[in-house]
Image: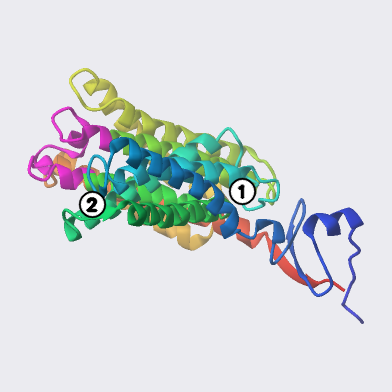
Amino acid sequence: MDKNHKVELPLEVVDKLQLKTGDTIRFTVRSNGVMLQPTEINSQKISLWWSLIPTVVMSIVFYLFILKQRLQQVPLTGTTSIATALIGLGVLSGTIFFIKSRKSPDNSASRNIYWRNFPTIVLSFALILLLALLGIFWVFDLIFTGATFDQLTAIFIFFIFSSVINYLMIVAALSISSTMLTSLFMAIISSGVVISMASNGQRRWWQHNLSFLGTNMASDSWWFNLTLIFSALIMIVLIDYLFVSLQESYPRTWQLMTLRVILTLAAVDLGAVGAFPNNATFHFFHDQLARMLVYFIIILIIGIKWLLPQVKKDFLSTSYIIGGVLVLTDVLFQFVGYLSLTAFELIGFMLAFGWVLLLFQAMQRLILDQTRIFEIKVD
């Protein structure tokens, strides 16, 4: 029996996808339908020339800035420098390119990202770009201390950096997925907490507790609190993305709805912990929010077998082990007195954070298990 089949495509689809004989089409089959796209999407080919036009405009703005400041030699770093211009104009242009690429009707990579969530993603990527530029030029300042350039060379350096920034932001916008959002969530919360710990090392934050990093006694406490708030926003977006994808392959049951509600409440609670730091004014409220976050995680670990019955047994076993360790650390802290408050909070944070990431990965696997991809050649 011949198992080969032919699929006829409407002329409108052929024109829309700019298909020609010999091209390969990718069929993504889910329970509720089929998504069709060429393996090489002409409309999404990233044109370097398209990104260079606004870069030229930004370079002209930078040149006018140099003229206004009457700079014959432009410093690489400093208040009035290439770094300052790139951090300001580069983040602005990169963010605009990110939004422009996301708005493209041909961008299928982000079809499960709704506009209600997109501002959060834009702010997160802009923040990451800002931090990356700050880090790069901090290193440059150490390597090229006091370096200056003539006007033409400074404009050329600005142009190259701006081109790379715009290109990378286009790539990021066209590559949004649950995997990317999970990586973004992990990068923001882990880097933010580590940076806060490092900046408060001399204040011996570990002699207090983890929440000390967000109090007015800590150095740059706003950074720790902002990290929690941004992480919560990304977590909400990721939850929305994952459940939209799950509902394409699985029926909308009360278990899935309950899981979504609890996860969303946990994300909101995480953001509230950052919004209400452990200062004297909000001490009681902060403690209650932190305690509620622990309860949400415990409820999820205990109930995940019923809330997400399709999940694999290895994930369930891992969940119960993590839950058992959480209970053990609580006993060692509350009743035995073996663990300090800081040790208890660090262990609890790492276990809860790690389990949430494992849950997101398990949900991604469920989505992939119900997805079949075929490639067909155009005759």
Query: Which of the two labelled residues, at mark 1 and mark 2, occupies the earlier sequence position?
Result: 1
Q: Residue furthest top?
A: 281
Q: Residue at x 34, y 40 (%)?
A: 67
- Please name whichever residue, 135 or 142, is drawn nearer the observer in this view of the structure: 142
Does the magenta run of residues contain 20? no
Picture coordinates of residue 261, whole percent (x, y): 53, 34
**Is residue 124 visible to the viewer in this orientation of the structure?**
no
In the displayed image of the protein, which residue is found farthest to the bottom? 1
Viewer-proximal residue among 128 and 246: 128
Image check: 52 left or right of 15? left
Residue 110's disc is: 1
Q: Is residue 207 above or below residue 375?
A: above
Tell me the amino acid under the disc marked 1: Ser
Could you tell whether 350 is left or right of 55 in the image? left
**Disc 2, SS:** helix
| Residue at the image point whose x is 56% and y is 41% from the top | 99
What range is drawn magenta here? Answer: 196-224
Q: Which mark is residue 266?
A: none
Q: Which mark is residue 138?
A: 2
Residue drawn where x is 91% and y is 57% of the image:
11
- Count of number-bearing discs: 2
x%, y% of residue 342? 16, 42
Is 320 placed left or right of 342 in the picture? right
